[in-house]
Image (cartoon, rainbow, N blue to C red):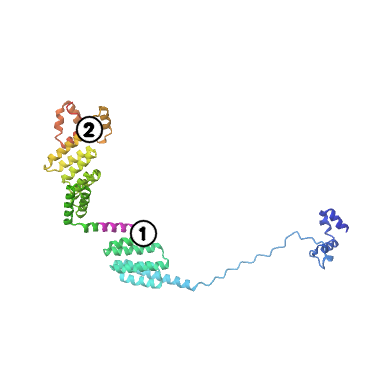
Amino acid sequence: MAKLKKIQQNPNSVGEEIRDPRFLQVMSVLLGIDMNFGGEGGPSGAQDTPMPDAKPASPPPQPKKEPTPEPEDEEAVAKKKAQEAGDAEKKIGNDFYKQKQFDQAMEHYEKAWELHKDITYLNNLGAAKYEKGDYQGTIETCQKAVEEGRDLRADFKTIAKSYTRIGSAYEKMGDLTQAIEYYHKSLTEHRTPEALAKMRAAEKTKSTAEKNAYMDPAEAEKSRELGQQKFQEGNWPAAVDAFTEMTKRAPTDPRGYSNRAAALIKLMAFPQAVQDCDEAIRLDPKFIRAYMRKGQALIAMKEFNRALDTFTAAAEHDDGTNRREIEQQQQKCLDAQFSARAGETEEQTSARIQNDPEIMSILQDPVMQSILQQAKNDPAALQEHMQNSQVRMKIQKLMAAGVIRMGR
């Protein structure tokens, strides 16, 4: 009781009193729990046995047992053996293929496919049929490769090869529409430079073939007559359509482009008219009418120097028949250029000349510098130099630009 009172007054003294076995027995009764920590015979026989300071020694590590290998899956083993056998047959087939013995190569590719389902074998089989000239067989084999490849979840690159080979077979058969379609499918699966080049070449060939098939001189003449009729009626858009049809029916006839240029000038579509005239001149450099219409369009665009160059080129290709018309057009161009700079002051003229690359190029030409210097001392010499067509053209440009002023 004295110990309990002591603990009641100083709870921290419980550690000291708990060493007494009698006190432990009392506490066991009070708390209703067994407080005999390891003593024999219950609380009455409990003794103050100190806990050992050192941890008990760990048992020595046991040596690791080697994992017992699991038995290999029989299905996987069989699949591996089938693949090895298939690859062996493919190798033999490749050797025959390189020797251009395609029948023997096909036998081994077919056997490889029977042994193991890999669409590479079918692609090789299709290649052998292609080289042998069996294009329909190539298409059927490679289509089977695509179908089987989908089920086998084959690599998209391999399927792309199948599509490319189908496209090549169709191209050999002359069916460019189907060829382009399968080249496109190949590029959808996997984009390669080879398939892209094949598709673009097929598209170009198809476009050329369609244009050639559309050409018809008789129909072209009908379109030309219709275009002239619409032109005379003042229906310029309808004339353009008719002459456009003529260019399709007869793409090497320069009249279609030149006539369309005339209608385009009426519609004030001058840049397009110049392009048509250039095409007509390319087809026939002696087609003077195209030069005249190009010059007219350039004058309307206020590109007087280019117009003068065009008329000069016309004069060089003319046999003398159109000389008068050419000179009239040249004078018309010069008059238009003079009118465009009417009312300019000398300062404005000088500033415009400085900003004109072509005029500055003429002024920096050593030959022209010599001619102009000579003309200052002897104005009549200028007329003599103008006998040369090239020099005359340059002098006319300088006069039109205001660099040379006659009569002063």
Q: Nearer the viewer, residue 105 or 63?
A: 105
- The number of numbered discs placed on residues in the rendered structure image is 2
Q: Quadrant of the N terminus?
A: bottom right
The residue that appears at 21% across and 50% down in the rendered structure is 238
Q: Nearer the viewer, residue 288 or 22?
A: 288
- Residue 94 visible in the current orientation: no
Q: State which mark lies toward you, 1 or 2.
A: 2
Residue 39, given in percent of the width and then of the height, sits at 81, 65
The residue that appears at 31% across and 63% down in the rendered structure is 167
Q: Which residue occupies the extreme left position in the image?
A: 321
Task: Establish if 144 lies above or below 353.
Answer: below
Q: Mark number for residue 401?
A: 2
Q: Main secondary structure of the magenta part?
A: helix
| Mark 1 residue element | helix
**Which segment is the magenta one?**
195-207
**Amino acid marked by disc 1:** Leu
The residue labelled by disc 1 is: 187
- Residue 6 visible in the current orientation: yes
Residue 314, given in percent of the width and then of the height, sits at 16, 42
Residue 204: say if magenta. yes
The residue that appears at 29% across and 61% down in the rendered structure is 177
In this rendering, position of residue 186 left or right of residue 377:
right
Q: Quadrant of residue 269?
A: top left
**Amino acid marked by disc 2:** Ala
Residue 118, given in percent of the width and then of the height, sits at 40, 68
Task: Establish if 318 lies above or below 106.
Answer: above
Q: Nearer the viewer, residue 371 or 263?
A: 263
Instruction: Work out whether mark 1 precedes mark 2 in sequence or the reverse, and give the earlier one.
Output: 1
| Mark 2 residue element | helix
Q: Nearer the viewer, residue 188 or 236?
A: 236
Q: Quadrant of the C terminus?
A: top left
